[in-house]
Amino acid sequence: MSFAATILTLYPEMFPGPLGLSLAGRALEQGRWSLDAVQIRDFATDRHRTVDDTPAGGGAGMVMRADVLARAVDSAPAGLPRIAMTPRGSPLTQTRVRDLAAGPGVAILCGRFEGFDERIFEARDIEPVSIGDYVLSGGETAALVLLDACIRLLPGVMGAASSGDDESFEAGLLEYPQYTRPVEWEGRTIPEVLRSGDHARIAAWRHARAAADTRLRRPDLWERYGGDPVQSPSGARRDSKE
Ligand code: SAM
């Protein structure tokens, strides 16, 4: 069964974009996933094909209208989970990506301007999802990120050699650091253990480095993993108010 992606956007020409190349592009050609990029403006009813209006309560910018969005959402195939890309959403995780990749596909609503009329979320059972704590100019690049993460997990896309099981987030940690030839480069050598051929030592080293790097770079992940609480430089717990 192919993974069906329906993208609701004001810029359908942005798709497949980078997903037309490399692994995802080949998988698209092979029919492992399908793409339907739908122009939201086609669901406007006035002569000017208006999709937005001024924010209730005042303020800068424009807001995407719920009535137009609803018609666009209703045009998506039934049975697909519905996601709207928004910085106000729950952070996208590898767990959510795995769930989505195991399902029939996804319908993704891409915002522009100041975002969506909030009523669309409840009225159409749409999950708000963010790709990180920063603001993009539009939801299309966020949708590409979400799709990329799903597509590489579809059966047959990565190939048997790389299941993704070892990668960052799969076991709750960042991945261990990787090296390849040349063995010596600019006076730096590949750690001896990785050249030892001793698989038990290599596995132990990799786990230790994955743990140390996660603790240092992602104390939030580390503590969720069950690691010891990371102290801030002032000595206070990282998550307490300082
Ligand atoms: N006014 C909104 C806010 O402060 O939450 C930001 C709107 S942003 C300029 C326009 C659109 O870009 C959003 O509706 C959303 O679709 C997309 N977008 C921006 N940042 C995003 C993020 N971190 N994750 C997912 N989508 C994002």
Image (cartoon, grey):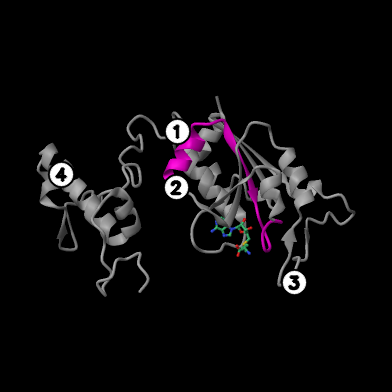
Span colored in magenta: 93-117
Relative to residue 91, is residue 79 drawn left or right?
right
Q: Which residue is mark 1?
A: 157
Q: Nearer the viewer, mark 2 or mark 1?
A: 2
Q: Which residue is mark 2?
A: 93
SS category of the residue bearing label 1: loop
Label 1 CB less than 8 angstroms from ligand 1:
no
Q: Are marks 4 and 3 in contact (CB under 8 Å)?
A: no
Q: Residues within 10 Å of mark 4 (few under 14, many from 20)?
A: few
Q: From the top left corner, tell me how far across and down residue 193 is, in percent.
A: 11, 47
State the separation of the CA atoms marked 1 and 4. 30 Å
Dividing the image into 4 quarters, which one contains the C terminus?
Answer: bottom left
Residue depicted at x 26% and y 73%: 233
Q: Which residue is mark 3?
A: 58
Q: Nearer the viewer, mark 1 or mark 4?
A: 4
Against 81, is 110 above or below?
Answer: below
Q: Are marks 3 and 1 in contact (CB under 8 Å)?
A: no
Amino acid type for the residue under numbered disc 3: Gly
Residue depicted at x 24% and y 50%: 210
Q: Which mark sits nearer the N-terminus, 3 or 1? A: 3
Label 2 CB less than 8 angstroms from ligand 1:
no
Q: Residues within 10 Å of mark 3 (few under 14, many from 20)?
A: few
Amino acid type for the residue under numbered disc 4: Ala
Give residue 28's quadrant in the image. top right
Against 208, is 239 above or below?
Answer: below
Residue 111 lies in the magenta stretch: yes
Q: From the top left corner, tell me how far across and down residue 205 is, in percent.
A: 16, 47
SS category of the residue bearing label 4: helix
State the separation of the CA atoms marked 3 and 1. 48 Å
| Viewer-proximal residue among 130 and 36 | 130
Residue 23 visible in the snapshot: no
State the separation of the CA atoms marked 3 and 2. 34 Å
